[in-house]
Image (cartoon, rainbow, N blue to C red):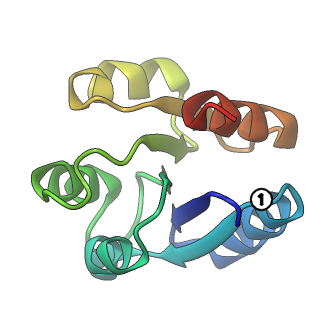
Amino acid sequence: MGKRIMIIDDEMDVVETVRLRLESNGYETSSSMGERAVPDTVAYEPDLILLDIIMPGMDGFAVIHELKRNSITSKIPVIIFSGKPKAAMIELFGPEGVAGYVSKPYEPKELIEQIQKVLGS
């Protein structure tokens, strides 16, 4: 059974593209967005979270804050997956213990390498 990855993003075309890429590399996936992101993540119990920042309703900043406060999800590594510049994301999220950053539009190889680095696979 492959490692489980939760994709939290409001752009369904991005979610589907990433899902296909990850599943073709042996990962299991689920997706969510906004207010459902935290309860869906708790229920799915992923090994890794790919998190977009700019989403309507509950944005990525609020999602990561809630994930880090929840005892079930606080230790799950998070890769920020955003159109924002990587340097800006590092500055904003460094103290939150984010495991990595991938900028959109993304290079498929970079995404898989970042995931493998974080998961140790």
Name the one closer to the observer, 91 or 31.
31
On the image, the x and y values in percent for residue 31 come to 54, 75
Name the one closer to the observer, 101 or 114.
114
On the image, the x and y values in percent for residue 43 come to 34, 80
Position of residue 69 relative to residue 108, above or below, is below
Tag 1: amino acid: Leu
Quadrant (top left/top right/bottom left/bottom right) for the N terminus: bottom right
Q: Secondary structure at mark 1?
A: helix
**On the picture, is 54 further left or further right than 118?**
left
Residue at image point 89% right, 63% down: 24
**On the picture, is 120 further left or further right than 17?**
left
Q: Quadrant of residue 91?
A: top left
On the image, the x and y values in percent for residue 28 come to 68, 69
Q: Quadrant of residue 36?
A: bottom left
**On the picture, is 50 further left or further right than 77?**
right
User: Which residue carries the number 1 mark?
Assistant: 22
Mark 1 nearby-residue class (10 Å; few <14, some 14–19, many ≥20): many
